[in-house]
Image (tube, helix red, strand yellow):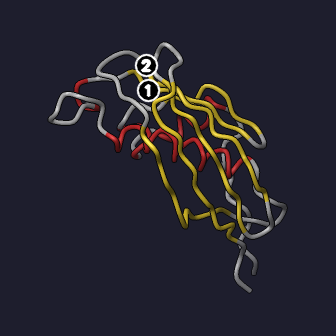
Amino acid sequence: MQPTQPAYPTTAEGWNERSQGRLPGHIDIRVTAIGPGFAEGEIAVRPYHVAPNGFLHAATVIGLADTLAGYGCVASLPEGATGFTTIELKSNFLGTTREGTIRARATLLHGGRMTQVWDAEVVDGGGKPMALFRCTQMVLYPRG
């Protein structure tokens, strides 16, 4: 018996609901738009997003970018695929913030049968780039 493809959300609201009780919900990621080849979202910076040095923690920025790339990956899976797993990621930090809202847009660069490559740019509330992010996703299929 072949496993069926999991029922993934298809809307930003659906992803926000599915995020609750999981890391994206715990760090307050809010998906604002999603579709094949892209995902957008934001985090309103709170004290628990900040590192002991007083600046936004790098893991907050990566969490936003990686989550959006992952959700976008699911929205862009080839026919027959059941999911994905991240096999590589990298981030370059260009700036930081202490307050406000950070936003990101993840975009599909390569949508192959076995891998996807995603880029995301994270910006501060004024639209100034804070981080450039790239990840590679391995597309998963049922065994058998």
> Which percent across, then down, holds residue 63?
43, 43
| Residue annotated with mark 2 | 101
- The answer to which of 99 and 17 lies nearer the viewer is 99
Farthest residue, direction right: 79
Farthest residue, direction left: 52
| Residue annotated with mark 1 | 43
> Which percent across, then down, holds residue 9?
66, 42
Label 2 crowd (10 A; few <14 / some 14-19 / many >=20): some
Kindly identify which numbered label has been placed on residue 81. none
Instruction: Name the residue at 57% across, 51% down.
Output: 134
Residue at disc 2, secondary structure: strand
Instruction: Name the residue at 51% across, 27% down.
Output: 129
> Which percent across, then down, holds residue 62?
43, 44
- The answer to which of 8 and 40 lies nearer the viewer is 40
Tell whether 64 sits left or right of 54: right
Label 1 crowd (10 A; few <14 / some 14-19 / many >=20): many
Do the CB atoms of the residues marked 1 and 2 lie less than 8 Å apart?
yes
Instruction: Name the residue at 62% across, 33% down.
Output: 105
Farthest residue, direction front: 94
Q: Is residue 52 above or below residue 138?
A: above
- How far apart, in angstroms, are the residues tagged by discs 1 and 2? 6 Å
Q: Quadrant of the N terminus?
A: bottom right
Q: Is residue 49 above or below residue 80?
A: above
Q: Is residue 96 above or below residue 75?
A: above
Tell whether 2 sits left or right of 91: right
Q: Is residue 97 above or below residue 93?
A: above
Residue at disc 1, secondary structure: strand
